[in-house]
Amino acid sequence: MPTHPPIIHYAERPHQKFNLIWAAASEKGLWVLSYGIDQSEFIKAIQARGDVNPIYSEEQLAPYLDQVEAYLAGTLHRFELPIDWTGMTAFQIAVRQAVTQLPYGQTASYGDIAAAVGNPRAARAVGGVQANNPISFVIPCHRVISSDGSLHGYGGFGGVQSKAWLLELESKNN
């Protein structure tokens, strides 16, 4: 009997700064969260995580997008959303879970995260994991900065300027 790929529901909401905010979730939790891209790019991001069947559903994604909207308005400081870690390596999961522990409005260096996952010499590997973070905002890779305090690399729409904007949002609403 053939098995069908799991369904991943997805939807989007407009945002003044980031154009469209896209979210996708499995029955286990958040699958992908991205912004500033079109629907076809987002579907590719969904499918990059595994063999799945993306289905558009505003209703299914409303709780996720409501929290993202509140975060971007500066009124939500901690996400209460499950994350589906399927398809990620143990190291990716460890790094991304460590990053989710960074408090709102605070930063850590790539080296700090490497040390937190038990591999203090893996700062570059942490950077690589964060550069391909499939779940923007909720896994707050914008809070990870260089050891000298500078803002290096940000894979999301708008690059380092978006990273600076997110850090400023958190700073003024903390």
Image: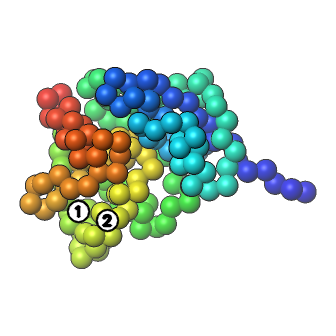
Position of 101 relative to 76 (above/below): below
Residue name at image x 60 percent, y 23 percent? 59
Position of 151 relative to 163 (above/below): below
116 vs 22, left or right, is: left
Q: Quadrant of residue 164?
A: top left
* Residue designated by label 1: 110
Q: Quadrant of residue 10?
A: top right
Given the current orientation, which residue lies at the most extreme right position? 1
Residue name at image x 35 percent, y 31 percent? 18
Look at the numbered discs 1 and 2 and tell me whether their residues touch, using CB distance below 8 Å: yes
What amino acid is labelled 2 in the image? Answer: Val
Q: Quadrant of residue 167?
A: top left
Residue name at image x 41 percent, y 36 percent? 36
Residue 144 appears at what percent x and percent y? 23, 53
Residue 153 appears at what percent x and percent y? 26, 55
Check disc 2: other Cα within 10 Å, few if <14, some if 14-19, many if 20+. Answer: many
Q: Disc 1 or 2, which lies upstream in sequence?
A: 1
* Residue designated by label 2: 126
What amino acid is labelled 1 in the image? Answer: Tyr
108 vs 92, left or right, is: left
Q: If the image is split into quadrants, where does the C terminus sit?
A: top left
> Secondary structure under badge 2?
helix
